[in-house]
Image (cartoon, rainbow, N blue to C red):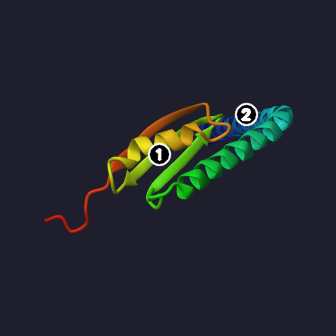
Amino acid sequence: MKTVNLLKALGIALCVATASSAYAQSSDAASSGAMTSSTSRTKAVKKADRKLGLDVRKALSKTQGFDVSNVFVRARGGAVTLSGSVPDGAQIPQAEDVVKNVSGVKSVSNKLTVANPKGGG
């Protein structure tokens, strides 16, 4: 008799687990349908951010005497973050000045550092 009750309890638990899983999937599907319009907007924003980042990188690479090889550019809604390193400390403020003049840039967060010379021992 105990075995029968145990099997009933396991069966009920299995039904509850299955029902809650099915409910979670259907509510996820409903919310993803509502998000479709915002997804296309998100893609447009990401595309604009990517373009701004490329424009900034291009402006830095065209700057005479500026080494862009270890500089990373991230753009988010017009806010540009520079990170990485440059070989000369004078290039840090120079980079910020160049970026501020790129069309679409609203703000600049300059996190550039001076690279350690190789083989410094």
| Label 2 vs 1, first from the N-terminus | 2
Whether 121 is drawn above or below 112: the answer is below
Which residue position is annotated with label 1?
A: 95
Tag 1: Cα neighbours inside 10 Å, few (<14), some, or many (≥20)?
A: many
Report which quarter residue 103 is drawn in: top right
Amino acid at dot 2: Ser
The percent coordinates of residue 14 (x first, y second) are 69, 40
Q: Return the residue at label 2.
A: 20
| Residue ID at (49%, 57%) | 64
The residue type indicated by label 1 comes to Ala
Report whether 61 appears left or right of 1: left
Q: Is residue 83 left or right of residue 14?
A: left
| Disc sitting over residue 53 in the figure | none
User: Rounded to the nearest whole Å, what is the CA distance between mark 2 and mark 1?
Assistant: 55 Å
Q: Is residue 72 left or right of residue 88?
A: right
Tag 2–tag 1 contact (CB < 8 Å): no
